[in-house]
Amino acid sequence: MSARRILVDLAAQSLALLEGERVLVRYPISTARNGPGEQRDSGCTPRGMHRVRIRIGAGCPEGTVFVGRRATGERYGPELAKRDPERDWILTRILWLTGLEFGRNRGGCVDTLCRYIYIHGCPDTEPMGKPVSHGCIRMRNRDLMELFDQVPTGTPVEIR
């Protein structure tokens, strides 16, 4: 059996889970409004080779709210949305990425892990298929739960 890997296509705003060269499933996503880029504080989605460093949220209910990578005990809904309409919600699960290319997405001011770049859930009202995030890769909560269950820590992630 070939190893699984994730391919993020910035132009197509899609994420594919592959086994070898075979696409197992493809999901719509939303990446950075500021486009691709690796610099700290750029609000951009980093390119290149990464891997899933840490998986957060296993067993949490759909819509679980995370702050600082910790579940707050809240579940996203209309009341929370109304209270904080401009918030960049991190929901359901987190796949925290680390870069593998020194000088490109690892180390110094281009370090993906230190930039807190995740694949994470967001409110279902947020658009998919167009870049509107603050740098992370946003997914529909149900899609993310499905993906999360299929990718262990260490899964390669290519962002191009």
Image (tube, grey):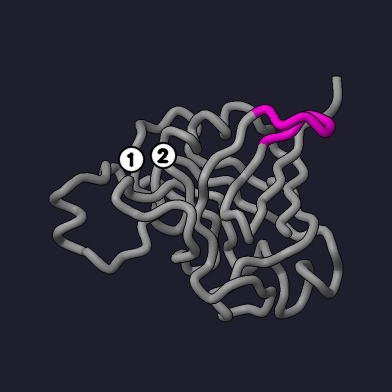
Residue 18 belongs to the span the image colors magenta: yes
Q: Percent position (x, y) of residue 105?
A: 76, 68
Q: Quadrant of residue 85?
A: bottom left
Counting residues from the start of the chain, the first of labels 1 and 2 encountered is 1
Towards the viewer: 22 or 19:
22
Marker disc for residue 63: 1
Residue flagged by tag 2: what amino acid is it?
Asn
Q: Amino acid at mark 1?
A: Gly
Give the side of residue 48 with respect to residue 34, left or right: right
Q: Which residue corresponds to the image point at 78% horizontal and 72% vertical from the top-left?
A: 107
Label 2, residues with CA under 10 Å away: few <14, some 14-19, many ≥20 = many
Q: Hey, which quadrant is residue 98 in on the image? A: bottom right
Is residue 126 shown left or right of residue 96? left
Query: What is the x, y in percent for residue 17?
Result: 67, 35
Whole-angstrom CA distance, mark 1 to mark 2, is: 7 Å
Q: Say if 144 sits above or below 13 in the image.
A: above
In this rendering, position of residue 133 left or right of residue 158: left
Q: Is residue 19 magenta?
A: yes
At mark 2, the secondary structure is: helix
Q: Residue at x 69, y 46 (%)?
A: 52
The part of the chain drawn in magenta is: 17-24
Q: Residue reaching furthest top?
A: 1
Q: x, y (%) of residue 83?
A: 15, 61
Q: Residue at x 44, y 52 (%)?
A: 128
Secondary-structure class at tag 1: loop
Which quadrant: the C terminus?
bottom right
Compared to residue 87, the image places residue 1 above or below, namely: above
Residue depicted at 45% across the width and 58% down the height: 68
Task: Check disc 2 and report the residue beneath it.
Answer: 141
